[in-house]
């Protein structure tokens, strides 16, 4: 994946040295297209719970990837390839990306050899932004339930503000020829499952199945994919309270789950 000079912090997430608990970072055919100005991809503003740093939720906070360079939200080609794949699926091509981004063919081919290379690069950088946003929200709280709830609502905020990115990442990349796009998609699910499975770090009398986290993620992905494919509204915020109830019930039991359902519903009202 090509790297570009002149990088700067772009997504409001503190770097490793800024964390008081020392979080670590790992190292064509032409066709009519909509102009880039109509792009529906937008970086939603961070809410307070995503940037207020408290003691860590677990012994080691979730590792956040470095801020991607260039910032995909400010990169016309990254924005364009998402819109192209989201709107045209298997009919996507380089000409469409070039037209949407309002760049020359040489500018595109200076960076990428194929449409698949471009899609993968953009996807990886948007994933990094997503992980930094959601992982930052998780790391900002002192208990697993508070952390997971914050991460869930941060994800819902992101999904609501970026419908094209949701469609691109959930179903669009499955139509690309690059197997790595599918691998990256699965890695996002594993990342989210990892946040859920950190519930094991807190004492509980519940015996939790080894596959509990991925079963929970699988149910959520199945619901979202169905809504995307049928054209129905995703309504991500409405999913959060029931999702939190189901997850907490699995890891902490019925009583804690009922408490969490009330808490999540109240958070939804307060927001």
Image: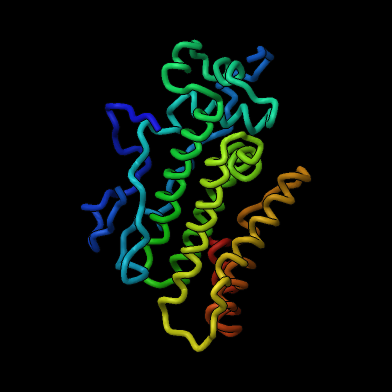
Question: Which percent across, then down, holds residue 157?
Answer: 54, 49
Q: Relative to residue 52, is residue 83 drawn left or right?
A: right
Residue 12's place in the image compared with 23, above or below, is: above
**Residue 271 visible somewhere in the drawing:** no
Furthest residue toward bottom: 205
Name the residue at 57% across, 40% down: 179
**Residue 20 visible somewhere in the drawing:** yes
Report the label total.
0
Q: How is colour applied across the structure in the image?
A: rainbow
Q: Relative to residue 98, is residue 136 drawn left or right?
A: left
Name the residue at 47% across, 61% down: 150
Question: Which percent across, then down, holds residue 32?
Answer: 68, 14
Nearest the viewer among 181 and 237 is 181
Residue 207 found in image quarter: bottom right
Name the residue at 58% across, 42% down: 169
Nearest the viewer among 142 and 230 is 230
Name the residue at 28% across, 27% down: 5
Nearest the viewer among 83 and 254 is 83
Q: Relative to residue 146, is residue 51 drawn left or right?
A: left
Residue 181 found in image quarter: top right
Q: Quadrant of the N terminus?
A: top left
Question: Which percent across, then down, holds residue 204?
Answer: 47, 85
Furthest residue toward right: 230
Residue 110's place in the image compared with 63, above or below, is: above
């Amino acid at each position: 994946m090509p790297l570009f000079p002149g990088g700067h912090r772009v997504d409001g997430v503190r770097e490793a040295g800024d964390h008081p608990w020392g979080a670590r970072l790992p190292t064509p055919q032409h066709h009519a297209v909509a102009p880039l100005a109509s792009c529906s991809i937008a970086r939603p503003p961070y809410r307070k719970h995503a940037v207020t740093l408290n003691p860590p939720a677990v012994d080691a906070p979730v590792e956040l990837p470095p801020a991607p360079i260039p910032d995909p939200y400010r990169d016309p080609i990254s924005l364009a390839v998402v819109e192209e794949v989201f709107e045209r699926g298997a009919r996507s091509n380089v000409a469409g990306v070039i037209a949407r981004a309002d760049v020359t063919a040489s500018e595109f081919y200076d960076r990428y050899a194929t449409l698949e290379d471009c899609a993968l690069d953009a996807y990886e950088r948007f994933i990094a932004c997503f992980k930094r946003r959601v992982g930052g929200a998780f790391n900002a709280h002192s208990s697993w339930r508070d952390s997971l709830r914050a991460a869930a609502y941060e994800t819902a905020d992101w999904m609501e503000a970026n419908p094209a990115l949701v469609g691109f990442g959930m179903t669009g990349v499955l139509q690309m020829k690059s197997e790595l796009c599918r691998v990256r998609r699965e890695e996002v699910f594993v990342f989210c499952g990892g946040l859920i499975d950190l519930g094991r770090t807190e004492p509980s009398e519940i015996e939790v199945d080894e596959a509990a986290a991925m079963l929970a993620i699988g149910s959520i992905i199945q619901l979202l994919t169905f809504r995307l494919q049928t054209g129905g509204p995703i309504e991500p915020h409405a999913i959060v309270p029931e999702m939190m109830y189901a997850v907490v019930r699995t890891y902490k039991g019925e009583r804690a789950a009922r408490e969490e359902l009330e808490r999540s519903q109240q958070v939804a009202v307060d927001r």
